[in-house]
Image (cartoon, grey):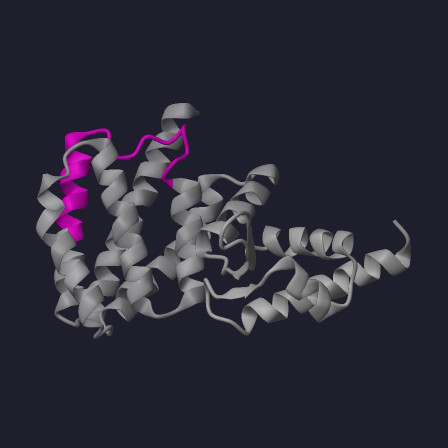
Amino acid sequence: MDTYATTLIGKTADQLSQLSLAAAQGDYLGAESDLLDRFGVSRPTLRQAAKIVERDRLISVRRGMHGGFYAERPDAQDAVRALTRYLRLEGTTIRDVFAVTRVISEESGALAALCRDPQLRSELAAFNAMIDGNDTPASVVQAETQLARLLAQMSGNPVLRLFVEIGYTFGIHESDVRFYTSSDDRAQTRALQHNLCDAVLAGDADIARLMMHRRSAMVTRWLEREGAQTA
């Protein structure tokens, strides 16, 4: 493909991206014929540009009835999947990730305690009421992930949410680390979850940070235990 064609495709992709960003998620951007007229490009150029923008999750292209181009938005999971693939290719371990994300996750507890969003606080209260029903490794893993994501959302900081998501997506599902296998581990986790939820709901940022620190210390001990067992 020559330089002119490559440049035109890139320019069209930028224009299509900007068109999507100026609209709300799910908005109809137009049929293919509409965008051909709008951008003044050939059909092959528009379709190649659309593939680039679609890969970035900024548009979706639908066929058939109500077909055409629609505005989309990438979410944290899209970014996390790409980042975790990169980290794995670089030989990153759960210990490497946790060394970075533990400080960030502890801050999420303190910030969550300042949240006054009634919907999010209601979700946390509902979670707190269900904690004691989680007594299998799988259910505790699911609960820990749910709690981490909820606290990160309550923090109001999208950067913090991204790093917490990376930590849980990469770490919790590592096959060589067996968290929550013993009843004592699960009981300790549930107790810390209760204390953390109580502190956040009470608006006590200092206690919430302390509870998050204790959770981090617990995971650190588990990682050290796993390391000793596999050495």
> Within the magenta stretch, is there residue 191?
yes
Q: Position of residue 21 (x, y in %)?
A: 55, 70
Please tell me whether residue 16 belongs to the stretch shown in magenta.
Answer: no
Q: Position of 146 compared to 96: left or right?
A: left
* Residue 60 % position (x, y): 54, 54
Name the image quarter holding residue 11: bottom right
Query: 63 or 98: which is nearer to us?
Result: 63
The range drawn in magenta is 172-193
> Which is more toward the observer, 163 or 127?
127
In this rendering, would 226 be left or right of 195? right
Instruction: Spot the residue most to the top.
Output: 230
Q: Residue at x 39, y 69 (%)?
A: 157
- Residue 160, image quadrant: bottom left
Nearest the eye: 13 or 93: 13
Q: Residue at x 12, y 70 (%)?
A: 202
Measured from the top left, where is residue 228 in percent x and y?
38, 29
Q: Residue at the spot x=17%, y=51% of the render?
A: 192
Q: How many marks?
A: 0
Q: Quadrant of the C terminus?
A: top left
Is 14 situated above or below 190? below
Q: Residue at x 77, y 51 (%)?
A: 44
Q: Position of residue 197 (x, y in %)?
A: 16, 59
Does residue 50 appear left or right of residue 177 in this picture?
Answer: right
